[in-house]
Image (tube, rainbow, N blue to C red):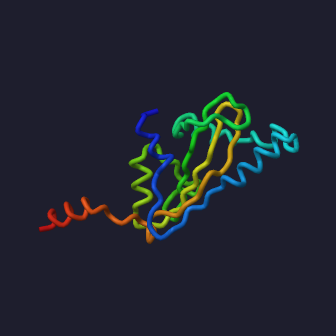
């Protein structure tokens, strides 16, 4: 996995859309597991396709799994939109994610936290991108773009 792929986990959310963080829900599930109210089978139930994406396309975090405490967590991003396949797309590179998020079609991005070792998974965040949620061009991009048009 290329080291620059780690940038995906912190992909900036800009534009008019808002980000939904699921950290409180995650902490509640972990707390219930640690208190013995949930079994490992209840919380470690990742779909095989999600585990495959985590192993091959995910961005490795510097955080260990809250359930098994043995492996590093991985963020996997899925993008859904009207012009994408029904199952969405899992971008393989930060450039592909940027292309999807800066396109003219509005998309919804979901970042899932996964432990490839024990199959723990939890939705980490969701944010809209593309369409009316596209990021405004940087000052350096707009300056170079205007000189190219002349």
Could you say where residue 89 lies in the image, as x and y percent from the top left?
A: 52, 51
Could you say where residue 68 lies in the image, as x and y percent from the top left?
A: 72, 32
Residue 89 position (above or below residue 74)? below
* Res. 89 in view: yes
**Horizontal arrangement in the rendering, residue 86 relative to residue 133 (left or right):** right
* Res. 52 in view: no
| Residue at figure coordinates x 44%, y 57% from the top left | 100
Could you say where residue 139 lies in the image, as x and y percent from the top left?
A: 27, 63
| Residue at figure coordinates x 31%, y 61% from the top left | 138
Which residue is farthest left? 150
Could you say where residue 113 lies in the image, as x and y percent from the top left?
A: 62, 44
- Res. 21 image quadrant: bottom right
| Residue at figure coordinates x 71%, y 50% from the top left | 26
| Residue at figure coordinates x 68%, y 47% from the top left | 122
Residue 24 position (above or below residue 47)? below
Which residue is farthest top? 70
- Res. 150 image quadrant: bottom left
């Amino acid at each position: 996995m290329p080291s620059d792929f780690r940038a995906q986990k912190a992909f900036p959310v800009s534009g008019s859309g808002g980000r939904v963080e699921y950290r409180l829900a995650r902490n509640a599930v972990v707390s219930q597991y640690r208190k013995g109210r949930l079994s490992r089978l209840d919380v470690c139930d990742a779909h095989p396709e999600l585990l495959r994406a985590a192993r091959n396309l995910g961005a490795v975090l510097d955080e260990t799994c809250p359930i098994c405490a043995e492996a590093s967590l991985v963020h996997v991003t899925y993008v859904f939109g009207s012009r994408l396949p029904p199952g969405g797309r899992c971008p393989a590179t930060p450039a592909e994610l940027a292309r999807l998020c800066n396109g003219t079609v509005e998309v919804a991005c979901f970042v899932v936290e996964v432990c490839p070792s024990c199959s723990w998974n939890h939705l980490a965040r969701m944010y809209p991108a593309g369409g009316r949620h596209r990021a405004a061009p940087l000052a350096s991009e707009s300056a170079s773009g205007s000189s190219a048009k002349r």
